[in-house]
Image (tube, coloured by chain):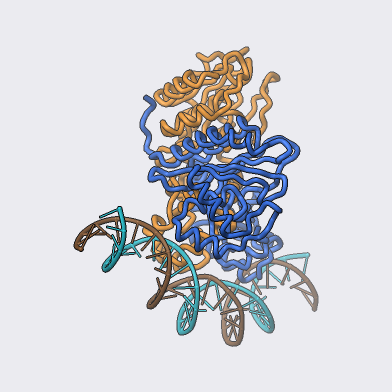
Chain colours: A orange, B blue, C brown, D cyan
DNA sequence: TACTAGTGAGATTTATCGTCCCGTTAGAAG
DNA sequence: CTTCTAACGGGACGATAAATCTCACTAGTA
């Protein structure tokens, strides 16, 4: 294995190392913080940061001194996760799950305007909801969205709920901020989210988080179906199976693929 | 924006460009395929590929000629997608603000050359100004820029104004240093900045500061619109709402990521 | 045999490192 | 409260060393 210092002396890799360092913090980082970790001359580090920022791989934060992943890095990572060998494995897990549960399953990640579907496996039922990959659904009235909200800090979730437009999609939609907050609090405690016809009339869903090794939520895994054949009680019964699939997904994504051969 | 060839001449970015190219294909790619897209000498490309492979960012496929994302790149992308940086929260606040005010709102931070747009929410009006995220606008003739100038110390402001090139963008642009200084002084007193068609003829704006916990200005939050439907008087009426959103933004940015549970 | 993909060795270009300097900030003394 | 000093973070300039480009070669294949 190459040493860390070895890699730092390879020019082509420095930008990558810096990116890794930025990404490894889940909060915006300052140049100084990175400098404490990567042992590069500060000028070099600073130039790399500005270069990466100018190219759109990084983005200056609102305080104008710290950095976060930029749009280009995000699209890159989406490309990584949706390409290559990992995708088949993920799809296999999802397919397996959907076959077991007999309903549509999906994997969603947060974006600016709502949750966006990353993967999706349809059932063969004639009656199903058409929300293709790439669709964006609201935060406040979907299982995935509420699950994401529940992963935020208390102050953030409060501001978020205050700022969201709580459109009344169905009679069940929670348009009262306090009711939504209560729901989110419950979700945080129980570890999964429910959507009982809050987004689309006649459709209900449950969602569980996919957690990375540090326990942060990477994405949400959900199953949904029409109320005609799926009751909330049955859906809750799927939670364990969902959690298992979520753990599988987390393992697949986080693991080094070259860990050990087949037993 | 930097050109593609521009980026290729920047050494630090070449590895990133190559990675982007590799992941843009959803199947394993050979060196030759990449070479057709990125216009690098074969030797250079090959060295970059082997370096990236040795470092674990890429890995060779079974056929030993094509490449796929390696374990390190995967964990990087996981980190990016799971780092909920709170950008969603910021966007929600901005969206909410823009919806309330009915005009385009933006968040800008100072840089060396001017104010750079960090976030931006457009209205659905057909008539609007096109200034995408990442655009840089001058200090001396924009609400955000003048607001930033007003946050500096007196000596700095003087030096800054002296060294700025006060280009006359419109008839309203203040090109006299003393007039600009007077304006800045007024801004400092009243706590918000106005731009009455000083940057673009027919566009006016008001901006308020986003302050951190120490009271220092981190960024500026502004609303702008065409004079055809937005008068300065109406814009001034938006100040309170802007201040409220600015407070929300400040709170979101400054709060600790460590969760305290919902009360 | 000819053609394509990958490889090796020097001259050159380029980024980088060390040093210095400036602006800012924290602390203390007046 | 002001002002001084010291220390720190952050930016500019020449020597250096790395990476790159050109050219020519090898190997595999049709």
User: On the rendered structure, is B31 left or right of A42?
Assistant: right
Image quarter hosting the N terminus of chain A: bottom left
Q: How many marks?
A: 0
Viewer-closest of A7 and B196: B196
Q: Whole-percent x and y of residue B103?
A: 65, 36
Q: Whole-percent x and y of residue B97?
A: 58, 33
Q: Whole-percent x and y of residue B106?
A: 59, 43
Image quarter hosting the C terminus of chain A: top left
Residue at 57%, 53% in the rendered image: B115
Residue at 60%, 47% in the rendered image: A75
- Do we see residue A244 in this rendering? no
Q: Is residue A231 above or below residue B96?
A: above
Residue at 68%, 47% in the rendered image: B197
Q: Whole-percent x and y of residue B198?
A: 66, 50
Residue at 41%, 56% in the rendered image: A34
Residue A117 occupies which quadrant of the picture? top right
Residue B128 occupies which quadrant of the picture? top right
User: On the rendered structure, is A188 left or right of B221?
Assistant: left
Viewer-closest of A230 and A21: A21
């Amino acid at each position: 294995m190459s040493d860390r210092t070895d890699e730092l002396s390879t020019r082509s890799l420095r930008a990558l190392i810096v990116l890794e360092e930025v990404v490894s913090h889940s909060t915006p980082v300052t140049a100084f913080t990175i400098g404490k970790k990567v042992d590069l001359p500060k000028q070099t580090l600073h130039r790399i940061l500005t270069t990466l920022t100018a190219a759109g791989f990084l983005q200056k934060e609102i305080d104008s001194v710290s950095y976060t992943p930029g749009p280009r890095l995000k699209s890159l990572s989406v490309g990584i996760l949706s390409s290559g060998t990992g995708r088949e494995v993920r799809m296999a897990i999802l397919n397996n799950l959907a076959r077991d549960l007999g309903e549509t399953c999906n994997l969603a990640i947060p974006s600016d305007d709502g949750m966006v579907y990353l993967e999706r496996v349809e059932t063969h039922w004639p009656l199903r909801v058409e929300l293709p990959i790439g669709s964006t659904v609201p935060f406040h009235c979907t299982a995935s969205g509420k699950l994401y909200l529940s992963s935020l800090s208390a102050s953030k979730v409060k501001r978020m709920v205050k700022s969201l437009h709580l459109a009344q999609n169905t009679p069940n939609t929670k348009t009262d901020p306090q009711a939504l907050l209560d729901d989110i609090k419950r979700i945080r405690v129980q570890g999964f989210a429910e959507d009982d016809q809050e987004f689309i009339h006649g459709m209900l869903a449950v969602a569980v988080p996919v957690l990375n090794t540090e326990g942060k939520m990477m994405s949400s895994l959900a199953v949904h179906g029409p109320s005609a054949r799926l009751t909330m009680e049955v859906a809750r019964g799927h939670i364990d199976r969902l959690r298992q699939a979520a753990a599988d997904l987390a393992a697949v994504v986080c693991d080094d693929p070259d860990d050990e051969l087949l037993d």
